[in-house]
Amino acid sequence: MTFSHIISSECFLASLGPRLVTFSHIISSKGVVTAETRTDSIRNDKAQVYEQAWHFDNKRNPAVGFKLAFNYLKAKRYVEAINICQEVLKVQPNFPKIKNEILDRARQSIRP
């Protein structure tokens, strides 16, 4: 496999977006990189962007807090997800979606 084949394969896989997780591995110039590693990296990048937006809004925008907590949950950063959920619920106590979809799931994931 030549370098141009590797690049075109990576471009094709990158264009698939969320469907990337269904592939068991990706061939790169450095060898085999698992799809999980690549998706975890994307989740961490998204979490960093939402974290900056959360701080930029002075932790007052519940929609940004929801997305940040969701990305923390998917990245298996459960304690951080719980902390963000609690901060969102302080700002807007009537936000049942964050409690049901993120807070409860994060708490269940922590428990043995």
Image (spheres, rainbow, N blue to C red):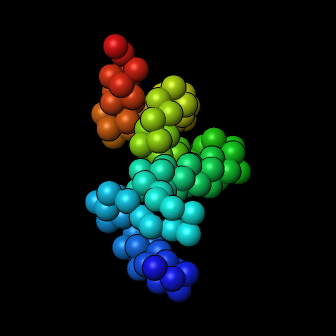
Return the residue nearer the eye: 38 or 96.
38
Say whether residue 18 is left or right of residue 48. left
Task: Look at 33% across and 22% down and name the residue there.
Answer: 108
Task: Look at 40% across and 69% down and name the residue there.
Answer: 17
Say whether residue 55 is left or right of residue 6. right
Say whether residue 75 is left or right of residue 57. left
Q: Residue 18's spot in the image, x, y percent? A: 36, 64
In the image, is residue 94 above or below residue 33?
A: above
Location of residue 104 (image quadrant): top left
Q: Residue 51's spot in the image, x, y percent? A: 63, 47
Q: Is residue 99 visible?
A: no
Quadrant in the picture for the C terminus: top left
Task: Spot the residue most to the front.
Answer: 1
Task: Look at 54% across and 53% down and name the residue there.
Answer: 41
Q: Residue 86's spot in the image, x, y percent? A: 50, 27
Q: Is residue 107 visible?
A: yes
Return the residue nearer the eye: 14 or 110.
14
Task: Look at 55% across and 31% down and name the residue there.
Answer: 80
In the image, is residue 1 above or below residue 91?
A: below
Q: Residue 45's spot in the image, x, y percent? A: 59, 54
Location of residue 96 (image quadrant): top left
Tally of marks:
0
Return the residue nearer the eye: 39 or 32.
32
Return the residue nearer the eye: 19 or 8.
8
Say whether residue 48 is left or right of residue 88. right
Task: Spot the residue most to the top.
Answer: 112
